[in-house]
Image (cartoon, helix red, strand yellow):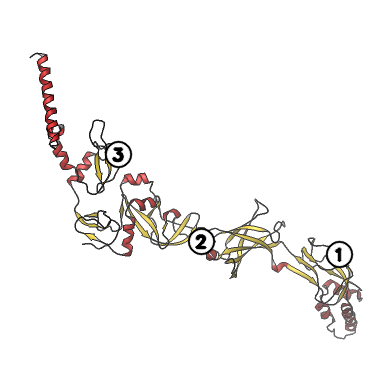
Amino acid sequence: MKPIALTGLALAAMLAMGGAGYWAGHRGLAVGWRGWLGIEGSLAANEPVGTGPVIYYQDPDRKPVYSAQPRQTDDGRPFTAVHASQDVSFEVKPPSEERTAQADPKRVLYYRNPMGLPDTSPVPKKDSMGMDYLPVYEGEGNEDGVIKLSPGRIQRSGVRSESVRRQSIVQTIHVPGVVQLDERRVSVVTIRADAFVQEVAPITTGDRVTKGTRLARIYSPEISTAGAQFITELNAAARGVPEGGARQRLENLGVPSEVIAEIERSRKVPLTINWSAPRDGIVLERSVSDGMKMTAGGSLFRLADISTIWVLADVPERQLAAVGIGAPATVRLRGRPGSSFEGRVSVIYPEIAEATRTAKVRIELANRDGILLPNMYADVDIGSDDPAPQLAVPDSAVIDSGSRRVVILDLGEGRFEPRVVKLGRRGDGMVAITEGVSEGDRVVVSANFLIDAESNLKAALSGFAQPEAKP
């Protein structure tokens, strides 16, 4: 046969097929090249039937191409509509897995409420908002409250888990403080009899003095009388007469012991007496001048030993339970950046300030260089005192709704379970779990809120309040 004849026959066949397709299309018949080859029917039989509204459209060849609106491929084929009941997954599954899953479908036990309410149905139905009830398949009924996610979703969400382990949690409390004098190291220099100040030593407020330093020279008629009586008793004692109470009277008047010893040695009463410092320290106050008359009980000087100093920190009432006697504390002076002092909590004052709702906590510090001065402001960090190891998880693992604290257990193979827990001490980014988990359990520490949003967490949590009724 000639080539021209063969070409004519081919063109005639193609025109006939096009006309048949045009005629079938006008009459609503789905006839295409797949129908001519007998493929369309077999593929349609294997495709799962979707229910619910159309949520997006996918490439007919299952390529990772999607559209929110109806669309066609470059060769004119429409995108496939994906319904709400169909698996919303961006993973490309091998055809062999799809055929296996379709060949061995699981039996549906019942349908449960999509919002987690304790309502089930033996047949498919919708709730009041038009949402389809979720099927519960055979083998899933014994895992109430377990959340199942595909590996693709887990990977895209960035879910990360860590094991529950025992460790010491050091809770650090940051509070303000004020430097104060050690009340036990403050002395007031007084005189116990009426006296005249003959001369005051050249010592002023702020000067440092040592024990025994002369502060003032005084004359007291009462002390002179007691001294004369003491000499009389000493002379009588030499003749065998028992000593009276003159020595005790001098001591009661506050006369320094070295002055009494000088009177006993010289058998003379000095006209004036040197009044000395009772301890080492700095002069906080000078209340005397030359020529003054002092009455009994009057204050001459006020001294303080600042070798040991106090820091009083204001701890809020809600954090007071975490502070214990002996807890380590670090003090940083605001006026001296970079300087820090280490000490321990010595006293917790048994009183709460009504205005600030804080309690005073005393920290004793050594002040050998004299850097710490009274009334300086400081920042205080109070830590735990060697707490015992306890079960702990990162802070990010806990979902706190206010009335309930929940962690999500990672059961493996894409299964997650919410677990109500009780919390303990917090510190260093960790929180102690006193009840709800065991050592070695894995908890989700990252993207746990995404699991809550992407899964049935609310429905799973409802199982804690009221068990789900099964038909």
Q: Is residue 19 above or below residue 240?
A: above
CA gap, disc 1 and disc 3: 97 Å
Of callouts 1 and 3, which one flags the residue occurring earlier in the amino acid sequence?
3
Of callouts 2 and 3, which one flags the residue occurring earlier in the amino acid sequence?
3
Q: Which mark is residue 387?
A: 2
Q: Residues within 10 Å of mark 2 (few under 14, many from 20)?
A: few
Quadrant of the drawing holding the N terminus:
top left
CA gap, disc 2 and disc 1: 55 Å
Q: Residues within 10 Å of mark 1 (few under 14, many from 20)?
A: some
> Could you tell me residue 367's position as x and y percent?
69, 59
Residue 247, picture quadrant? bottom right
Under mark 3, the amino acid is Tyr
Under mark 2, the amino acid is Pro
Residue wearing tag 3? 66
Q: Which mark is residue 215?
A: none
Q: Is residue 196 above or below residue 125?
A: below
The residue that appears at 85% across and 77% down in the rendered structure is 194
Q: Nearer the viewer, residue 246 or 9?
A: 9
Quadrant of the drawing holding the C terminus:
bottom left
> Dots 1 and 3: beta carbons under 8 Å?
no
- Furthest-front residue in this view: 26
- Furthest-left residue in this view: 1
Under mark 1, the amino acid is Ala
Residue wearing tag 1? 201
Tell us which disc is closer to us: 1 or 3: 3
Secondary structure category for the residue under label 2: loop
Image position of 5 (left or right of 198): left
CA gap, disc 2 and disc 3: 56 Å
Q: Nearer the viewer, residue 249 or 45?
A: 45
Image position of 183 (left or right of 252): left
